[in-house]
Amino acid sequence: MHIDARTLPNGSVLEADLCIVGAGAAGISMALEWIGSPRTVLLLEGGGLEYEPAMQDLYRGEIVGLPYYPLQAARLHYFGGTTGHWAGFCSTLDPIDFDKRDWVPHSGWPLRREELDPFYARAQPLLELGPYEYAAGDWQRRDPTLVPLPLDPRVMWTKMWQFSPPTRFGARYRDAVIGARNVHLYTHANVCELEANESLGAIEGLRVRTLDGKEHSARARYYVLACCSIQNARLLLASNRRATAGLGNGNDLVGRYFMEHLEIPSAELVLAKPQSTKTKMYMLDYGTTKARGELSLSAQAQKEHQILNGTSSLEVGALGEPVKSTFQFLPPDMIRQMMAWEKSGKKGPPPLIASLPPSAMAPPPTSPRVFHLMTRQEQAPNPNSRVTLSTEKDAMGMPRVRFDWQLTELDKRSIRTYYKLLGQEMGRTGVGRIQMRDWLLSDDRTWPSFISGGWHHMGTTRMNDDPKQGVVDANCRVHGIGNLYVAGAATYPTAGSANPTLTVVALSLRLSDHLQSKA
Amino acid sequence: MDRRQFLAVTATSALVAGLPAAFNLHALAQPDLLPILGPEAVREIGLRYRELMPAENQMRALHAVILAARPWSARVPWLAGPSIGAMVAEDFAAGRTIVLQGWVLSTTEARQSALYSMLAD
């Protein structure tokens, strides 16, 4: 069932067993799990079924830390959420990502990778991926022409990514959600406040507003915040009627530990013997490639060198040519053009051709010699990297976000050490030589103006069994509030090097199971 | 030092030390990096190395430190010791690397590049 909240009489009361706030990858994945159950689900989406600039503007915020992408363009505020423009990159977190690492402050999850494996397997079909196989050997068996580079597994290994079509959750699951009798989707239903009971031990209801000035309320037994890391934190902080610091924020943790994946051109690889070096396993023909490898740092090397987890991808290029970071490659207007191009049936060349490096315009060489190496690295959990409330308010009267992205010396030292180790491996094996880019050679405190993430917003309501170290527990329940949960990457204590969506969906399925067992 | 002088030093070094050809000055001044990175990049790497290591900024000194870095088997005339390529690989395996102009290089090949830059000069 679908209802536009703007069509409801002012002051309507919406009720169900479960209320999910936000209809992106996390919220829709959960809602799908409840279809056909005897329980009712409210799925509240702030935006409509399609992109609307006025709804996007609600995400606008103040950027006060390191340079960042405009917040109103980094996330999509409509049914399907940011899957409306994601690229489809999927991989699992590594076992070490869940460990408490004594060289990474604030690291450690309250669950193990093995506990997530069955949910990863269930997430694969939702994201229209292949089999739950992420070992290079599995893909080599399928296609013997995919050969991993001869790296010492004690130092480097080939970590595999799979590529979703990409699944646009809004388009792919619209009929299923709207057709479900027990799932009630309300669009243009912006949750502006969580109302707690007097003891702050439970949520009694939600204030829901529409842009045309109506206010409704929503009530359920259980509530799940699934509206992305920044908005989840914003909503908790803004729900300060009874708790002045915001709900779930008794230990001043909500909004802290915001994390991104550092995605930035960092080095170049020049092959010694291009004719005889097999690199097909690492190549991405977007829209065609089902899986590809990236060069990943081993757990042993991370521990030995006291650095973070990271990978690099290979892109055919030319030595010394300028390469854009992720944010530079896809500025907001380019993303809009790409969305329009896709919506029009992909007629003509994709607009992002204009953003490609010069070498990409030439026919691909049969034996490429030079590769740009693009880092994808976790950032160290950092309490000073945070989301707070701005004094400015949006059109709903809700405080906007003040966004302060901060990195540490460990982040940069890790990237540099990664490339030094990769350079040693490439030299030892005779594969080639690595040249680090200039920005990486400076001190550990300086970041280039083109510092970039992957639009991967993580942290802000981190998971830890200790309420003094985390906002939610291992079941993603907000500490101290019996019926409030958080879904999505906001709960990640650490980010690993894998793009977050697969883990977002896996954790959402896990949370769904947990809530179904309670309901 | 011009090319004529360089060749004279090379010949003398080889004769005096009784070195295998792979370890004479002329051979060492042709690092395997050349076909990978090209002569200009190798020259720049060599210049940077000499700038960073003034104590080695002399042809004989460079030759001596490369020879001194050889494993024992390469110093016994009747043994077929490791090639310079093997020494470079061993440098990488042991972490004996240096970053010059952003390139992650083995110490041996960095010294070879320095020799090359002297010849190129």
Image (spheres, coloured by chain):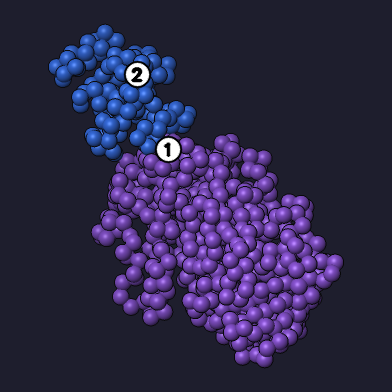
* Left or right, residue A334 beside residue A257: left
Specify the farthest residue to the left: B4
User: The residue marked by circle 1 belongs to what chain?
Assistant: A
The answer to which of A137 and A149 lies nearer the viewer is: A149
Q: As drawn, is A149 to the left or to the right of A23? A: left
Quarter of the C terminus of chain A within the rendering: bottom right
Q: Which residue is mark 1?
A: A441
Residue type at the position of mark 1: Leu
Q: Which chain is purple?
A: A
Q: Residues within 10 Å of mark 2 (few under 14, many from 20)?
A: few
From where the camera sits, is residue A288 visible? Answer: no
Give the labeled residue for mark 2: B54
Secondary structure found at label 2: helix
- Near-viewer residue (B41 or A383): A383
The image quadrant of residue A38 is bottom right
Q: Position of residue B107 (x, y in %)?
A: 39, 26
Q: Residues within 10 Å of mark 1 (few under 14, many from 20)?
A: some
In this picture, residue A15 sits left or right of residue A177: right
Task: Write down which chain is painted blue.
Answer: B
Q: Nearer the viewer, residue A485 or B61?
A: A485
Label 2 to label 1: alpha-carbon separation: 21 Å
Q: Nearer the viewer, residue A306 or A11?
A: A11
